[in-house]
Image (cartoon, rainbow, N blue to C red):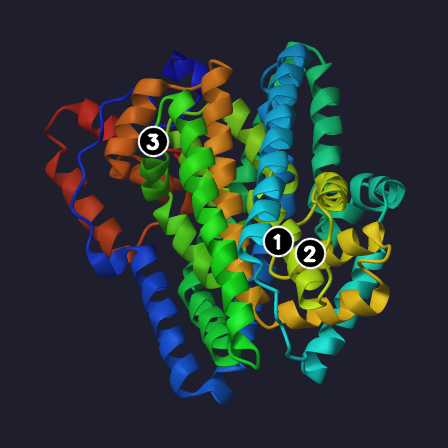
Amino acid sequence: MAHAAETGAPGAGTTPARRTKKKLYTQLWFWVLIGIASGILVGLLAPGFAADTKWLADTFVQMIKVIVGPVIFCTVVVGIASLGNLARAGGLALRAMGYFLLMTIIALTMGLVAGNVFQPGAGFEGQPDPAALEKAREDAVSGSEESGIVPFIQDSLLPDSFLGPFVDNSVLQVLVLAILTACAISSLNNNLRVRLVGGIEAIAQVVFGIIKIIMWAAPVAAFGGMAYTVGQFGSASLTNLLLLMGVFWGTCFVFVAVVLGVVARLAGFNVFKVIRLIKDELLIIVGTSSSESVLPRLLTKLQSAGASKQTVGMVIPTGYSFNLDGTCIYLTLGALFIVQAGGVSMPIGVQIALAVLMVLTSKGAAGVTGAGLVTLAASLQAFGGEFFPPEAIVIGLALIVGIDRMMSEGRALTNAIGNVVATLAIARWNGELDRERLAAVLDDPLLVEADMEAAHGNSADEEVEQAAEDAAQESGDPADRREKVGVGS
């Protein structure tokens, strides 16, 4: 077991600080729930008005995307360079990529199995509306630009300038720059390396300060996203579309409960306790339909839960491009739905070939609403052939686009849970997890609250309560006061 000093986890290995009971209305998840419930109500009662609220969620995601690049760059550079040993970082990266590949294959296979067993597209007789067709054509054009391994390497993986990936919010390219920068810093003499890592950590704290401000808009974004989704939901041939959505969500649940449950058990923890630990982040994802919106919070929470800074800084950002379990389930299931809706039967051998192709095309799909649809278009166009001619792809995407928002939430939730489990499991197998700290946090998630508040904000009421408590303890044991120090102190 790694000790607290080795993991670098904030709060790890210490006695829990005294906590006052937080008022319900001071907690972010409460207001996110209010936003979601209000959005559903407005979507049902005033669908016309609800159709104009999507910009609230889009604006929130847009602001989050502004800081995702810097967050990934800083955390990956610090995570690798702070090791001071490229061989150790390389071993961690190899374990992570091996794990990601295995989970990708399992998720793609589960999508194929679910599509063949339940056949959600069989007997489909409806036609997409003109607006959906136009949106599908746009996605098909975007997908055609991304198909093939060479365009993927040249256009999606490797940057053509240092600042360009930050401007374009290209997660994969930022990741490549971060790894190169970290390797360069690791090769410097120790004193200079330590100073540079400290400077980048300081920049990261500024970025997290920006996040504190942005996160207060999460309830409003949740309202806008849910109002739009509920207001737009519903069309002809609803039975097949609802079956597709139900099969997708059910498959994601089985993947989380069974596959990730087994991984978690092998690593010595319970997957449902992990879900309880990150419930705040999952609620934000439900409202915004984007896993990127919680990336900074997951970085802090997992480090506070006992995973080493190095493992968290490497696995979480990498997983956002290479460990998209929900997206993989969606790709194979969506492809089979399109084939079945066209009244065509695809042989098992062809399905396996399609899944093999999707092992590649699924990498680099961003965790933002609609990215899964574009990736599906890219995969089908790359596969081509008699099963996916251009017109069939456009019509198929137009059928799915009406419910893609609901499925996008399932993708984002599954992706986030998968990356959290991956981080904790890889940290455990790499000897960089404080198992006692993790066990305590999973039993009492409130143990990470001090670190989360320090890094991501505190309400005014809580600050007043904390100040009163600090004043009351001035004559008490100084150790009680020291225990309050968290990530951002």
Q: Is residue 189 left or right of residue 456?
A: right
Kindly report the distance in space between the C-alpha atoms of the residues bearing marks 1 and 2. Answer: 5 Å
Residue type, numbered disc 2 = Ala
* Place of residue 29 in the rendered image (x, y in percent of width and height, measured from the top left): 33, 56
Q: Which residue is mark 2?
A: 335
Give the mark nearest the N terminus, 1 or 3.
Answer: 3
Residue type, numbered disc 3 = Asn
Q: Do the numbered discs 1 and 2 sit on residues whose CB atoms are within 8 Å?
A: yes
Residue type, numbered disc 1 = Leu
Q: Is residue 388 left or right of residue 320?
A: right
Mark 1 lies on a secondary structure that is: helix
Mark 2 lies on a secondary structure that is: helix
Q: Residue at x 45, y 34 (%)?
A: 260
Around disc 2, counting alpha carbons within 10 Å, would you say few (fewer than 14), some (14 to 19), or many (20 or more)?
A: many
| 401 vs 352: above or below | below
Specify the quadrant that holds the N terminus: top left
Around disc 3, counting alpha carbons within 10 Å, would you say few (fewer than 14), some (14 to 19), or many (20 or more)?
A: some
Kindly report the distance in space between the C-alpha atoms of the residues bearing marks 1 and 3. Answer: 28 Å
Q: Do the numbered discs 1 and 3 sit on residues whose CB atoms are within 8 Å?
A: no
| 298 vs 477: above or below | below
Q: Residue at x 38, y 86 (%)?
A: 45
Q: Is residue 149 left or right of residue 172?
A: right
| 274 vs 292: above or below | above
- Viewer can see residue 108: yes
* Place of residue 445 in the rendered image (x, y in percent of width and height, measured from the top left): 28, 38
Q: Which residue is mark 1?
A: 333
Would you identify the image quadrant in which residue 386 lies?
bottom right
Q: Which mark is residue 319?
A: none
Q: Which mark is residue 270?
A: 3
